[in-house]
Amino acid sequence: FFSQIIPFLVMIASRAPRAFLRAASALPSSSSLSPASTARPQHRNMATEKQLFQQIQSTKNIMKITSSMKMVSAAKLKGDENRLYAARPYNKWATTLTGEPSPVPEGADIADAEFLDIPDNSLIVPLTSDKGLCGGVNSFISRGVRGMCAKLDSTGRKSSVVVVGDKGRSQMRRTVGEKIVSAATEVQTPYNFDLAAAITSEVFAAGRDYAAVVIVYNEFVNSATYKQVYKVITPMSSTGPDESMVEYEFEPDVKNEVIEDLSEYLLCSHLFHSLMEAAASEQSARMAAMENATKNAGEMVDSLTLQYNRARQARITTELIEIISGASAIEG
């Protein structure tokens, strides 16, 4: 076989200089070249085998990362669920005083609620996360706070915002930035009561003359579902028609101090429970997002592998045709 191919290659090599001279004589002179003819040559948009192979390997690496993040989120979700189930009974006394959180109607968005139960001069505390890659957990809260502020402004009710979480701060800075008075970011996880107490101190440091504190967060339902709710917490009063805990007797001159301390502890308890709900919702959303990302990466690997096999088969077929054509030319 090689005894037939070698003379054929020699013949092509001997004819190449003459073909090159004929092609050079047919080219236009440098003075007649137009700007279009001096432009850079256009390349095909078809990916080569090497590029496809690199895309396959990088996509497989991404799939490994997303799969690992899913398993990590599943492990963290178990711990957050345990802490949440322990926090719910702990917060029953606070729920008895302030009532259940206001849910969003089924199938509706929190931004579409009317917020008629929120008084004038309220402080809104949205709970978001410091990290992303968790679906729409932070976007839903940010959109809800934006709609809440718009509804309150349209009815002449003033409001301020204290943001918890870096993602929420970066999103709300563009929409309600003028209302943000403080932000708590880079908080330590898993959440604990000390964090809730620190946030409560930030809220009270922002001002004690607010008519209500509104906590906006994601309520955990199960590993695949969460919903947006908000709590309206009004301060407890020791005098007047809205006097709190009238069924209890207090020592003289101590009721004001007790009610003030109890109000702060009430807000701290609600914040702790809301943080537990938000943490479980974040991990469940991240687990679902990483599962979808892993599935999409697998489908992309299958598609790229098919393209790679087709390109490889086309190259091998072309090389075989060239070899057979050369051998046929020599025999002819």
Image: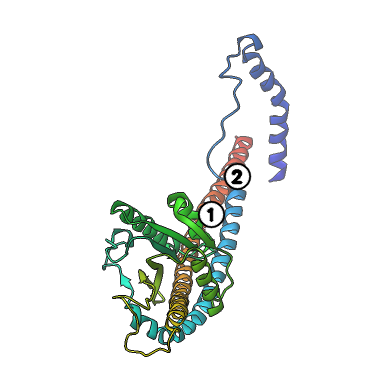
- Tell which residue pokes out farthest to the top in this image: 31
208 or 85, nearer to the observer = 208
252 or 126, nearer to the observer = 252
95 or 16, nearer to the observer = 95
Secondary structure type for disc 2: helix
Q: Quadrant of the C terminus?
A: top right
187 or 82, nearer to the observer = 187
Q: Which residue is mark 1?
A: 309
Residue drawn at x 66%, y 17% as measured from the top left: 24
**Residue 116 higher or lower than 233, as above or below:** above
Secondary structure type for disc 1: helix
Q: Residues within 10 Å of mark 2 (few under 14, many from 20)?
A: few
Q: Is residue 298 visible?
A: no
Residue drawn at x 68%, y 35% as measured from the top left: 8
The answer for how far apart the CA atoms under marks 1 and 2 are is 15 Å
**Residue 195 higher or lower than 166, as above or below:** below
Q: Which residue is mark 2?
A: 319
Q: Earlier in the sequence, mark 1 or mark 2?
A: 1
Residue drawn at x 47%, y 54% as measured from the top left: 171
Q: Residue 289: percent from the left, percent from the top?
A: 46, 65
Q: Residues within 10 Å of mark 1 (few under 14, many from 20)?
A: few
Q: Amino acid at mark 2?
A: Glu
**Residue 235 higher or lower than 309, as above or below:** below
Q: Is residue 80 visible?
A: yes
